Image (spheres, helix red, strand yellow):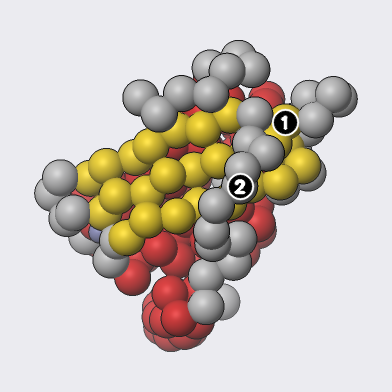
Amino acid sequence: MNERELSELYQQVILQHNKSPRNFGELPEATHKAEGFNPLCGDHFHVALVLNEDGIVSQVKFSGEGCAISKAAASMMTQAVTGKSIADVQRLFGEFHALVTGKLDPEKQSNQLGHLKIFAGIRKFPARVKCASLSWHAVVAALDKKNQISTE
Ligand code: ZN
């Protein structure tokens, strides 16, 4: 896929997820929660998830308000982490962060990013890196707080 195709796909996917975000809403049965705030842009989300007895993220939801990039990234994050272990989520976050900060070339270095690759274009807009990674920071922070609910 060349750069222009990637950029068109990126715009389509962002618009689509922004219009109808996946896993958007409250999750009253959550075992882990965290909040993410990006003062540079005003993005503000809550991420809530259920970690089952096997240590797998069985459900994840997000709520709040933010720009199109932050909302689409949160929507895609919920899809990407569902069914994964804590270690897998942490590894995927590491790859995603490396991608958006330009430290990982998804076509040349092995990774598990899948559809998340479309965020590669963010590296050209450093001010938006935080928008794209906000919900990922929140989900990793939530998983860090072992079996307790926190809104820190
Ligand atoms: Zn934003």
Q: Residues within 10 Å of mark 1 (few under 14, many from 20)?
A: many
Q: Which residue is mark 1?
A: 51
Image coordinates of residue 32 in percent, x first then y, are 58, 29
Image coordinates of residue 62 in percent, x first then y, are 50, 52
Res 58 visible: yes
Q: Amino acid at mark 1?
A: Leu
Q: Secondary structure at mark 1?
A: strand
Q: CA distance from mark 1 to mark 2?
A: 12 Å
Image quarter of the C terminus: top left
Image coordinates of residue 19 in percent, x first then y, are 45, 81
Q: Secondary structure at mark 2?
A: loop
Quarter residue 41 falls in: bottom left
Q: Quadrant of ligand 1?
A: bottom left
Q: Identify the residue shown where x is 71% and y is 46%.
A: 59
Q: Which residue is mark 2?
A: 27
Labels in figure, total: 2
